[in-house]
Amino acid sequence: MTNLSPIVLFVYNRPWHTRQTLEALSKNILADQSKLYIYADGPKENATEEQLQKIKEVRKLLREKKWCREVEIIEREKNIGLSDSIINGVTQIVNKYGKIIVLEDDLVTSVGFLKYMNEALDLYEKYEKVMYISGYMFPVKAKLQETFFVISACPWGWATWKRGRELFEDNAKKLLDEIIFKNLDNEFNFNGSYPFTEMLKAQVENKLDSWDIIWYASVFLKNRLCLFPRKSLVRNIGHDETGVHCKKSWLSNIYNKQEIADNIKVEPIEIIESKKAREAMRKFYISLGNPPLWVRAKEKMKIILK
């Protein structure tokens, strides 16, 4: 691989998480040959001294060492929010290079993450049916093939091409209206297993700042495929109530300690959706709506005490 994809990392005010992400990335195969762009969002107007200090810590950390062969840091003076930061940053870089690998500040990658992503980008570059590459896979119970396709999208370590970005529709209302008009909400929700439609509605109503729900809706309505690995090459360490969206700390038992693969073979496979994988993901989504017994007991105790 001579034409490696640029990597883009989005950070804000979580120095400990950002360090874990950068340390892991620097140990990746191909990191010493890759270019890394880091977008650091700025402070909010009502930021506290503590929040400002954390932003400063993150920005100091970014310059602590040379995390990849080449590193370019883009620091925003003001806060534009996660969704706009990612959409704008991805657009800028993918238009320049034609392809992109995207990370956020709470994602720990395995040593084989960049190798897998670059190989997949090269292999499926000319297949327009494939819109998205995911480095993450949920810890499902089913035994799946090494790589497979699903009509879905996952924000925890992903990649696409310029043609994929061009299919991305950033108008959440337009996406929601089309899903409802075509009566596709049940299918969009993985047969009712997860409230993706409600997330999209919240995005339209400005109650949620989530670029990934817009990405998923774009992939879904364009009937495009996402390549997933059998076993995740990414661990999400953000389910500790420090992130914008990850407020259910009990999920840390699922994600924070998830075992990840050092290597996933990327070989040509038939470009159709895997029904087995889709069903495995549907069952996993259902499990997220059923908290463990200790969580339910804790919530019940809160009610009793009130």
Image (cartoon, rainbow, N blue to C red):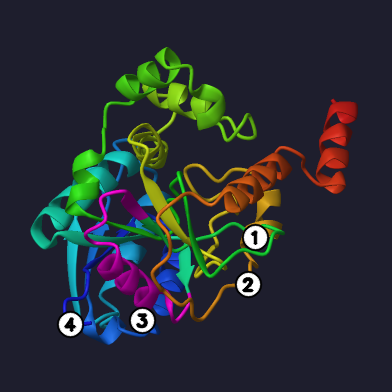
Sequence order check: which comes first, mark 2 or mark 1? 1
State the residue at coordinates (46%, 44%). 152
Please indicate, yes or no, whether residue 260 appears anywhere in the rendered image.
Answer: yes
**Image mark count:** 4
Instruction: Between label 2 and label 1, give the one nearer the viewer.
Output: 1
Residue 2 bears which disc, if any?
A: 4
Amino acid carrying label 1: it is Pro
Q: Residues within 10 Å of mark 2 (few under 14, many from 20)?
A: some
Asked if the residues shown at circle 2 and circle 3 are in contact, with their CB atoms under 8 angstroms apart, the answer is: no
Q: How crowded is mark 4: few (under 14 residues within 10 Å), some or many (20 or more)?
A: few
**Residue at the far front in the pictured view:** 270
- Alpha-carbon span between mark 4 and mark 2: 30 Å
Residue topped by disc 1: 139
Give percent across and percent down for residue 256.
62, 63
Q: Is residue 120 magenta?
A: yes
Q: Quadrant of the N terminus?
A: bottom left
Pick the residue in front: 107 or 60.
107
Magenta part of the chain: 110-132
State the residue at coordinates (42%, 21%). 179
Amino acid carrying label 3: it is Ser
* Element class at badge 3: helix
Residue topped by disc 3: 26
* Element class at badge 1: loop
- Alpha-carbon span between mark 1 and mark 3: 25 Å
Residue 104 bears which disc, if any?
A: none
Pick the residue in front: 40 or 195.
195
